[in-house]
Image (cartoon, helix red, strand yellow):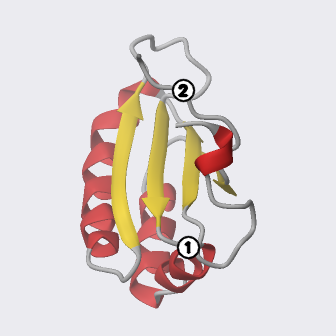
Amino acid sequence: MTTESLPAVGTPDSSVTFINVFEISADELDELDEKWEQGARLMRDKPGFIDSRMHRARSSDSRFQLVNVSHWESQEAWEAATADPDFASRTRAAREQTEQPVTPNPAVYDVVVELAAP
């Protein structure tokens, strides 16, 4: 796929990628993994959801221990899904129930370059 075949950035029907990198103590990862999966199951049923994966750092020295990458059919679908009060309360509770602070760094991105193996 070349950049010419990608939807124009910012068009209403273009898909978006949501990325959230988490700064969290390596010893609290298992607990947050479980809570994230519960929230992800809630999002899976929302209109416009495509997929989601949580990535875990192999090294406990990594600044970002968890990286969530989700794909949505549109910015509007993502905004509607994350506005769900149940989702908001679950994510807040997951951050607040850890002994050490969890710092999320969420943002929505557009693909500008994509490469695939030949």
Q: Residue 40 location in percent, x, y?
A: 32, 62
**Residue 97 versus residue 13 in the image, above or below:** above
Q: Is residue 72 left or right of residue 13?
A: left
Could you say which is closer to the camera, residue 19 or residue 49?
Answer: 49
On the question of residue 102 being in view, the answer is no
Residue density around tag 1, few if under 14, some if 14–19, many if 20 or more, within 10 Å? many
Q: Residue 47 location in percent, x, y?
A: 37, 83
Check if mark 1's residue and mark 2's residue have beta carbons within 8 Å.
no
Q: Residue 80 location in percent, x, y?
A: 53, 86
Q: Which residue appears at 57% of the width and 29% of the height? A: 64
Which element carries disc 2, helix, strand or loop? loop
Residue matched to label 2: 115
Q: Which residue appears at 33% of the width and 57% of the height? A: 51
Q: Which residue appears at 34% of the width and 72% of the height? A: 43
Residue matched to label 1: 74
> Which of the two labelled residues, at mark 1 and mark 2, occupies the earlier sequence position?
1
Tell me the kind of residue under disc 1. Ser
Q: Which residue appears at 39% of the width and 85% of the height? A: 86
